Amino acid sequence: MAFDAKKFIPQAVEDIRKAVGKERCIIAVSGGVDSMVAATLAAKAIPSQLVAVFVDNGFMRKNEAQQVKEAAGKVGIPIRIANESERFIKKLEGVSDPEEKRKIIGEQFIRVFEEIAKKEKVKVLIQGTIAPDWIESGGGGRQTIKSHHNVGGLPEDMELKLCEPLRELYKHEVRMLGKELGLPAYIFERQPFPGPGLAVRIVGEISREKLEIVKGACFIVEEELDRASAEKKMERPWQYFAAVLPSKTVGVAGDERIYKYTVIVRAVRSLDGMTANFSEIPYEVLSTISTRITNEIMGVGRVVYDITNKPPSTIEME
Ligand code: XMP
C-alpha cells in the first residue's frame, strides 16, 4: 500500500506521546532529513519536554553547524550546538578498521547525549533511524553490512531509552513526510549524509590533513553537481560527494615529482539507498571537478570517478 504521509503524522505524534509519557527527551539534529523530520514530529508531540542538540563531531561538511542551526531555527526547533570535535578526533587516532570507527563514533555520540541528559534530567533519546539503517546493521536476522552509527554503533550499557518514530520508513517516505510537515524544500530534498560524517569518507586511518582534503573535495563536488543539475546538463544525483583514499600516488607538477593523495568522486542514482547506480556525469563536468580539486586542494594529486553500482559496492566507502 502506498505510504500516506497525512495519516502517518497524527499516528506518530500519538505514538511519541505514549512512548515517552512525561519524560524529558533529547533529540540529536544532524540537519539531515531524517533527524529533522523526527525532530519536527517530536516538537509537535512534546514541545515542552524536548531538548534538541547538534553534536559537531568534527566530521561535518564546510559551514554545516551554522547552516543546521539556521535551518532548524526556521522550522521552530531551537537547537544548541555541542562542539565535541576534539573528543571524536582523539578517540579515532590510530583506528583504521571501518566497523571499529563506526562503533567508536556511535559510542561517543551516546556519551555526549548522556552527559547532556544528566544535566537536563532527560531519560529518552529520540532518533531519526529509518529502515535501511537497521536492516544494514543486521536487524531482522540479517547479516551486518555496516553498523550504522545510530543502530549497530549503540553501546550495550546505554542508559537512555530509545524512541524511533521513523523506524519503519524509507528515505523517500521520510521526504514525503517532510514536505507534508511544511519543512522547506532545501531540507526535505537534501541529499543523505551519513551519521559518522566525513569519518567514513576517509578510507582507513583519519588524519587532520585527510579531513581537510575530504572537506574541500566534498564542497567542490556538491557545488559543481548542483550547478550542472541546475543548468540541466544532468539529472541531480541522489547522493554526491568525495572520499579520500589512504595511499598516495605519484604525479608531476611542472618539472617536479609529486606524491599526493587520491580523491574518489562518487555520485549515484537511487530510490532508498538500498541499491544504487552510478550517475552519468558529462565529461566536461567531471573535468571541471578534477581540475578544481587538484588546483584548490594542496594534498591531492589524482581524482577518480567511482563507476560501481550498489551492489556490489556500498554508496559510502566504509
Ligand atoms: P551505504 O553506504 O550503506 O549507505 O550504501 C546507504 C545510505 O545510508 C547512508 N549511511 C548512513 N546514514 N548513519 C546514517 O545515518 C550511518 O552510519 C550511515 N552509513 C551510511 C549513506 O550515506 C547512504 O545514503
Image (cartoon, rainbow, N blue to C red):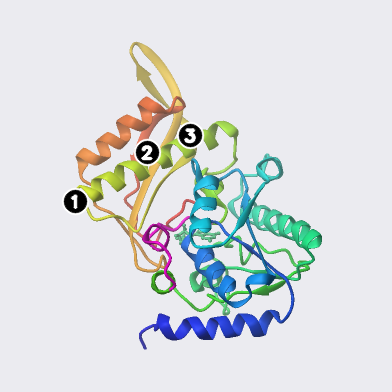
Look at the magenta stretch and give its main secondary structure: loop
What numbered label is drawn on residue 129? none
Q: Which amino acid lies under the numbered mark 3 shown in the image of this protein?
A: Ile
What numbered label is drawn on residue 220? 2
Q: Which amino acid lies under the numbered mark 2 shown in the image of this protein?
A: Ile
Residue 92 is situated, as x and y percent measured from the top left of the image, at 67, 44
State which tag comes first along the sequence, 2 or 1.
2
What numbered label is drawn on residue 213? 3
Residue position for label 1: 232
Image quadrant assignment for residue 139: bottom right
* Total numbered labels placed on residues in the image: 3
Q: Which amino acid lies under the numbered mark 1 shown in the image of this protein?
A: Lys
* Frontmost residue, 291 versus 138: 291
Density class for disc 1 (Cα within 10 Å; few <14, some 14-19, many ≥20) is few
Label 3 sits on a secondary structure element that is: helix
Residue 291 is situated, as x and y percent measured from the top left of the image, at 30, 30
| The N terminus, quarter of image | bottom left
* Frontmost residue, 120 versus 87: 120
Residue 185 is situated, as x and y percent measured from the top left of the image, at 37, 61
Does residue 318 appear anywhere in the picture?
no
Which residues are drawn in magenta? 181-194
* Residue at the (39%, 57%) spot, across then down: 186
* Frontmost residue, 194 versus 138: 194
Q: Is mark 1 within 8 Å of ligand 1?
A: no
Rounded to the nearest whole Å, what is the CA distance between mark 3 and mark 1? 28 Å
Label 1 sits on a secondary structure element that is: loop
